[in-house]
RNA sequence: UGGGGUAUGGCCAAAUGGUAAGGCAUCUGGUUUUGGUCCAGUGUAUUGGGGGUUCGAGUCCCUCUACCCCAUCCA
C-alpha cells in the first residue's frame, strides 16, 4: 500500500465549512450544484469544479445538482448542454434529479422581481446603455442615480410587465435593483436585474422578451433548489454582496444558500479561457474541440486520459484561494500513475531499423505476459519470432556516447521476452545511412531459461518483420512552447508529430487486450476512438514514460537559470497629523510606551480613545496598551466601540491580573476571547474556569519529567543542538496543565531539566 | 487611485500561538528482462518585507510591497 493512503489528508477550507455547517445543524443535508453556462465546451477547469461540487455532496451524503445557467439566449446552445452532461457522466458522477435549467425558473424569478419592485427595491430604468455606464461612476468616484429611479411602484410594475410582453425594443429599459450608487463595490451600484432581449432561447423559445441577469438569477436559483453551499470561482467575490442582498431583501425563508469562492485552475503551457480555446478551434490550429492537445474534457477523453486520473489530479492539487498555476507534470503524473497499474504492455517500434539474425532459422512463438512483475494482473499473448525483426533506430548507436545501454557494435542487448543479440555488421546505403544490422543471437539466452551467463545492460522492444502490423501513431506534445502562453503566437510547432509507419506486434490489433496500451519503453497509447480501424489502426500518445536517459542527455543545457532575486521596495507611511503627533509624544514620553505601540494607538482614533478610557481605571499603562493595541484592535477592526461586549475598565482589570501574575499572558488571551463574546468580568471568567496560573515548581517538575521520559527522541535532538524543540516541550507541559502552567517558569524549568 | 481578495521550497498545498506536513518536480542510491514502476534517501524553506506583542509568532497587532478581481444590458 502506498504512502498516499496512509497519509492523513487534511481538509480544504470548503470541506471544513461544510463539516462545520452540518455539525452545527445549520443544514440537515449538504446540497451543492455545478452551474455552467452552456456556451462552450467544458475543460479541466470545469473538472475541478465538478470534482469539488459532486465530490463534497458524495462525501457528506448530500446531493449535487447539475444546472445549466442559461440566462443569456444569444450565446447558449443545446450542443454545449450535451457536452457538459457527457463530461459529468464521464467523470463518473450522477446529478441529483433531472438536469436543471435557470430558464425553468423564469416565471418564479419574474415574480421575485415584481416583489422587489413592490418593496421599492427595484425600478425600471430607461437610460441608454451609455448613460448607464456613465452614471455608474468609476472605482474612485461615486455614481449618480438615474432620474427614473423614483418611478412609482405602479409605473414600475406596468413597465416591467410590458417589458416582459415584448412591447419595447432591446435596450429601451432595464430593471435595476435600488441599492447604492455610491457603493465602493461597483457591483452594488444599482445592478441590472433584467434586460430586454428579443432573442430565441434554445429552451424557452420565444416565450420571454426579458432575461434575468446572473446576479439576480443565480442566488435565487440556488435558493429555489435548496442549495446550501454555492461554490464558485474567485472572480465572483465582488458579486457575493448582491447574492446576499437579493436573498435578504426578499426576506426568503431559511435555510438559505451561501456563496464561497475558490481559485480557478490554471496549468502551465496551457490556455483555459473559452475565448482562447475558441480561437484555436476556429483558426484551425487544432482539429476541433476534441483535439487531443486541448485541455477540454473531450480532448482529454480522445487523447486517452482516464476519468480516474483527472479526478485524482483534482484531488492532488487541492482547493484554496490563492491564484496559482499548477505544473503540467502533475497532470502527467496522474495519468501515468493510473495507467501504470492498469494497462497491458506491448511492443511497438516507432522508427524501425531492420535486424537480420543470421544464425537463427525457422520461426517460433514466444509466450509473453502483458504485465510486468509488479503489476498484479494476469494475461499474456504470443510473440512471433524469426530471423528478421525490427528494433527502434534509437536503440542502436554505432558510436555510442557514454552511458548508452543499448545495442552497439560492441555491446549486446536483450530483445525483451526473447534472446540476447550481438551486432555483427552495420549495413549502410550510399549516403552512409544505416539501413540494416546483421546480428547473431545466443540460443541459450532465451528469456526465462537463460543459461548463457551474458550480462546485458538493457532489454529493448522489437517486432517480428512478417507479422508486425503497420500503425499510425500520433505523438502529441504540449500545445504551447511558453509556460504562460498568451495565444496563437506561442504555439509549439511540434505539438503533433504523425508517424505513419510505426510497427506493432500483431496481438495489439488482433487480440485487443485493451484500448490503452503501454508501448514498452515509449509511453502510453490509446486507440483513437474516431479514426481507428483494424485496417488502418491509429494510436494517440497519451503521455510518455518518464525517461531519465533522455533527461540526462539534455541536462547540460539547463544550467543558466539565474534565481530571480526578489527586489523589494519599501513604501512610505503617511505622516501623522498634528493631534496624532501630540498623542504619540505623550505615549512615548509620559507613559513610556514603545514607539510601535504608541504609533498604532496614536494613529487610530477608536483605539486611542478606548485606551484613554481604560487608563482611567488602571495607570500601569504598558500592559493595558499592549492588550489594547494587539487584542482590542482586532475587535475594533470592523466595529465601533459601542458595539464591543466589554468595557475599557474590564480591559484594565485584565491587565492588572496579568501584571500581578495571577494569570499568564497566554491565559489572558483566552480570557479576552471570552470577554469579547460574553462581556463577563475577567475575574469571574478566571474564577469560573479555574484559570489561575500554576507557578509552583513542585507541581510543574513532575510533569516535565514525565514528558521528557516520553520523548527520548526529541530530548536527544534537543541536546544535539535543535533548541527549537524547547517550544515543543513547553507546549507539552502547557497542554498537560490545561494551559495553566506559568510558561515563564516552565521555560526555565524545562531548560534546566534538559541541560542536566 | 476606491473596494474586494491573495502571498508558506522550482510547482501545488497543510499546519487549535508550541518539532514548518504531504504530493509533484529535482538529484542520489537500491530493486528491476521497461533508463518505467517500486523502495530508500535528497532541501540552512529570511512562511512576501519591516516592526511590535509574547517564554514562544506562518498563525495575533501595525505597516509596507507585489499580484489577482470589480466600472458588459456576459457569466
Image (tube, coloured by chain):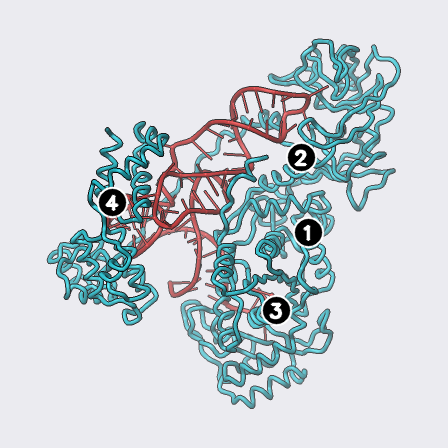
Closer to us: A17 or A302: A17
Label of residue A92 in the image: 1
Q: CA distance from mark 1 to mark 2?
A: 20 Å
Which circle's residue, 2 or 4, is located before the other in the chain? Answer: 2
Residue receiving disc 2: A340
Which circle's residue, 3 or 1, is located before the other in the chain? Answer: 1
Question: Chain A rendered in what hue?
Answer: cyan
A39 sits to left or right of A364: left
Could you tell me residue A180's position as x and y percent?
Answer: 44, 76
Q: CA distance from mark 1 to mark 4?
A: 54 Å
Residue receiving disc 3: A225
Q: Residue at x 49, y 74 (%)?
A: A248
Task: Characterize the local packing of mark 1: few (<14), some (14-19) or many (20 or more) Cα atoms within 10 angstroms.
Answer: few
Which circle's residue, 1 or 4, is located before the other in the chain? Answer: 1
Label of residue A20 in the image: none
Circles 3 and 4 in contact, beta carbons < 8 Å:
no
* Residue A494 seen anywhere in this rendered image of the structure: no
Q: Residue at x 78, y 25 (%)?
A: A368
Residue receiving disc 4: A743
Amino acid at each position: 500500500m502506498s504512502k498516499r493512503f496512509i497519509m492523513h489528508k487534511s481538509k480544504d477550507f470548503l470541506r471544513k465549512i461544510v463539516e462545520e455547517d452540518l455539525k452545527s445543524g445549520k443544514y440537515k443535508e449538504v446540497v451543492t450544484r455545478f452551474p455552467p453556462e452552456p456556451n462552450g465546451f467544458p475543460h479541466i477547469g470545469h473538472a475541478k469544479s465538478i470534482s469539488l461540487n459532486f465530490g463534497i455532496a458524495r462525501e457528506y451524503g448530500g446531493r449535487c445538482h447539475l444546472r445549466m445557467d442559461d440566462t443569456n439566449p444569444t450565446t447558449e446552445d443545446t450542443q454545449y448542454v450535451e457536452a457538459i452532461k457527457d463530461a459529468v457522466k464521464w467523470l463518473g458522477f450522477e446529478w441529483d434529479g433531472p438536469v436543471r435549467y435557470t430558464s425553468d425558473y423564469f416565471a418564479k424569478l419574474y415574480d421575485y422581481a415584481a416583489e422587489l419592485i413592490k418593496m421599492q427595491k427595484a425600478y425600471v430604468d430607461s437610460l441608454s446603455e451609455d448613460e448607464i455606464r456613465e452614471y455608474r461612476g468609476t472605482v474612485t468616484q461615486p455614481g449618480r442615480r438615474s432620474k427614473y429611479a423614483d418611478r412609482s411602484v405602479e409605473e414600475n410594475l406596468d413597465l416591467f410587465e410590458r417589458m416582459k410582453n415584448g412591447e419595447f425594443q432591446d435596450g429601451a429599459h432595464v430593471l435595476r435593483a435600488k441599492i447604492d450608487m455610491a457603493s465602493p463595490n461597483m457591483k452594488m451600484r444599482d445592478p441590472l436585474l433584467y434586460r430586454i432581449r428579443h432573442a430565441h432561447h434554445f429552451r424557452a423559445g420565444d416565450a420571454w422578451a426579458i432575461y434575468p441577469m446572473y446576479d439576480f438569477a443565480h442566488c435565487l436559483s440556488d435558493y429555489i433548489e435548496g442549495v446550501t453551499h454555492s461554490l464558485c470561482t474567485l472572480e465572483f467575490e465582488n458579486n457575493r454582496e448582491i447574492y446576499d442582498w437579493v436573498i435578504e431583501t426578499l426576506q426568503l425563508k431559511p435555510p438559505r444558500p451561501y456563496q464561497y469562492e475558490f481559485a480557478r485552475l490554471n496549468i502551465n503551457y496551457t490556455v483555459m479561457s473559452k475565448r482562447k480555446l475558441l480561437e484555436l478551434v476556429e483558426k484551425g490550429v487544432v482539429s476541433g474541440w476534441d483535439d487531443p492537445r486541448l485541455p477540454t474534457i473531450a480532448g482529454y477523453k480522445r487523447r486517452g486520459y482516464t476519468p480516474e486520473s483527472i479526478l485524482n489530479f483534482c484531488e492532488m492539487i487541492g482547493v484554496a484561494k490563492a491564484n496559482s498555476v499548477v505544473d503540467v507534470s502533475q497532470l502527467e503524473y496522474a495519468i501515468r500513475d493510473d495507467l501504470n497499474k492498469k494497462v497491458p504492455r506491448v511492443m511497438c517500434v516507432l522508427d524501425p531499423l531492420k535486424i537480420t539474425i543470421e544464425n537463427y532459422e525457422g520461426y517460433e512463438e514466444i509466450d509473453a505476459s502483458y504485465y510486468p512483475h509488479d503489476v498484479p494482473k494476469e494475461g499474456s499473448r504470443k510473440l512471433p519470432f524469426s530471423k528478421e525483426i525490427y528494433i527502434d533506430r534509437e536503440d542502436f548507436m554505432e558510436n555510442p556516447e557514454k552511458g548508452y545501454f543499448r545495442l552497439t557494435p560492441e555491446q549486446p542487448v536483450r530483445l525483451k521476452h526473447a534472446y540476447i543479440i550481438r551486432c555483427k555488421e552495420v549495413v549502410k546505403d550510399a549516403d552512409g545511412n544505416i539501413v540494416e544490422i546483421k546480428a547473431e543471437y545466443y540460443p541459450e539466452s532465451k528469456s526465462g531459461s537463460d543459461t548463457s551467463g551474458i550480462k546485458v545492460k538493457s532489454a529493448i522492444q522489437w517486432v517480428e518483420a512478417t507479422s508486425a502490423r503497420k500503425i499510425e501513431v500520433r505523438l502529441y506534445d504540449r500545445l504551447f512552447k511558453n509556460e504562460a502562453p498568451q495565444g496563437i503566437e506561442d504555439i509549439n510547432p511540434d505539438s503533433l508529430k504523425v508517424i505513419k509507419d510505426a510497427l506493432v506486434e500483431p496481438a495489439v490489433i488482433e487480440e485487443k487486450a485493451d484500448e490503452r496500451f503501454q508501448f514498452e519503453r515509449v509511453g502510453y497509447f490509446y486507440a483513437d476512438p474516431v479514426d481507428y480501424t483494424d485496417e488502418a489502426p491509429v494510436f494517440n500518445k497519451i503521455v510518455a514514460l518518464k525517461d531519465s536517459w533522455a533527461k540526462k542527455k539534455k541536462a547540460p543545457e539547463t544550467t543558466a537559470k539565474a534565481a530571480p532575486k526578489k527586489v523589494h521596495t519599501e513604501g512610505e507611511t503617511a505622516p501623522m497629523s498634528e493631534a496624532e503627533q501630540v498623542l504619540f509624544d505623550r505615549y512615548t514620553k509620559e507613559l513610556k510606551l514603545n514607539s510601535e505601540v504608541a504609533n498604532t494607538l496614536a494613529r487610530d482614533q477608536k483605539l486611542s480613545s478606548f485606551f484613554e478610557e481604560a487608563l482611567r481605571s488602571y495607570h500601569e499603562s504598558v500592559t493595558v496598551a499592549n492588550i489594547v493595541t494587539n487584542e482590542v484592535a482586532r475587535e475594533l477592526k470592523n466595529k465601533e466601540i459601542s458595539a464591543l461586549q466589554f468595557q475599557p475598565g474590564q480591559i484594565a482589570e485584565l491587565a492588572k491580573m496579568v501584571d500581578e501574575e495571577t494569570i499568564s499572558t497566554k491565559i489572558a488571551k483566552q480570557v479576552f476571547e471570552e470577554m469579547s463574546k460574553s462581556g463577563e468580568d475577567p475575574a469571574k471568567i478566571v474564577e469560573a474556569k479555574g484559570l489561575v496560573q500554576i507557578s509552583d515548581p513542585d507541581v510543574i517538575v513532575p510533569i516535565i519529567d514525565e514528558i521528557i521520559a516520553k520523548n527520548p527522541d526529541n530530548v536527544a535532538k534537543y541536546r544535539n543542538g535543535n533548541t527549537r524543540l524547547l517550544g515543543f516541550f513547553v507546549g507539552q507541559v502547557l497542554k498537560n496543565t490545561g494551559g495553566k502552567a506559568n510558561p515563564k517558569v516552565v521555560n526555565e524549568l524545562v531548560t534546566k531539566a534538559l541541560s542536566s
